[in-house]
Amino acid sequence: MSTDPSFRPDLYRGTARFYDEFRPAYPQPLFDDLRERARITGDGRLLDLACGTGQISFGLASDFVCNSPWDGGLEWQRVMADTVRNWTSEAGVTDRVPTNLAQHLAEEPHGTVLATAGYTIIGEFGFPTPYEWSVEQLTGFMYSTSILSRPALGPRCEAFEGDLRKRLLAVEAEGVFRERIAFSYTLMRSP
């Protein structure tokens, strides 16, 4: 019996517009560093694994011929995580993440799978970047996920938006939620 996680086929339906609009853009220093470390020459092909809507690919496309805000210890992040847990249950969408996903990733991390396929890890590079969210951006970010997308929430969208706004503004009345986003990439070479 396979222990591979099984994902719903409609998992990301309706999320692309929100992903493009509300996910923070990668910082220019990340692209510059990646171009230098990968020794991008203007030739070759780009393979962007786990690419979301392709923000890295689009950012580097001209160089070739042919990625969660509630993880953290800040009070607003704890409120956000609690709200996500509540609404995942309220909307009945707890099945949108396979129950064995964490176990599967612990047993077979992406790097191990790719190394087994012959890829060599050159390095892992991080770019912590200050970022400020508004309630609208955090709501849009949630809609960009497979867990609490607009299709997943259905007729509960308005109630979710109101509840999230109320909870977040209770901890940050000015409505600006600051954090450092840890953008990163793993550079690998093909066999």
Image (spheres, helix red, strand yellow):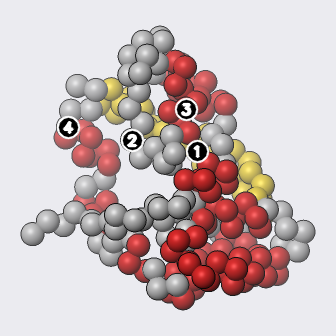
Calculate the distance from the C-alpha at mark 3 to the C-alpha at mark 4: 26 Å
How crowded pointer 3 is (Cα within 10 Å; few <14, some 14-19, many 20+) is rated as few
Which mark sits nearer the N-terminus, 3 or 2?
A: 2
* Residue 11 location (% of width, % of height): 42, 65
- Residue at the location (66% across, 37% down)? 27
Calculate the distance from the C-alpha at mark 1 to the C-alpha at mark 4: 25 Å
What secondary structure is marked by label 1? strand
Q: Which residue is mark 3?
A: 58
Q: Residue furthest left?
A: 1
Q: Amino acid at mark 2?
A: Leu
- Residue at the location (74% across, 48% down)? 130
Calculate the distance from the C-alpha at mark 1 to the C-alpha at mark 3: 16 Å
Q: Amino acid at mark 4?
A: Ala
Q: Which residue is mark 1?
A: 183
Q: Are marks 4 and 2 in contact (CB under 8 Å)?
A: no
- Residue at the location (90% across, 68% down)? 174
> Splitting the image into 4 quarters, where does residue 170 fall?
bottom right
Q: Which residue is mark 4?
A: 117
What secondary structure is marked by label 2? loop
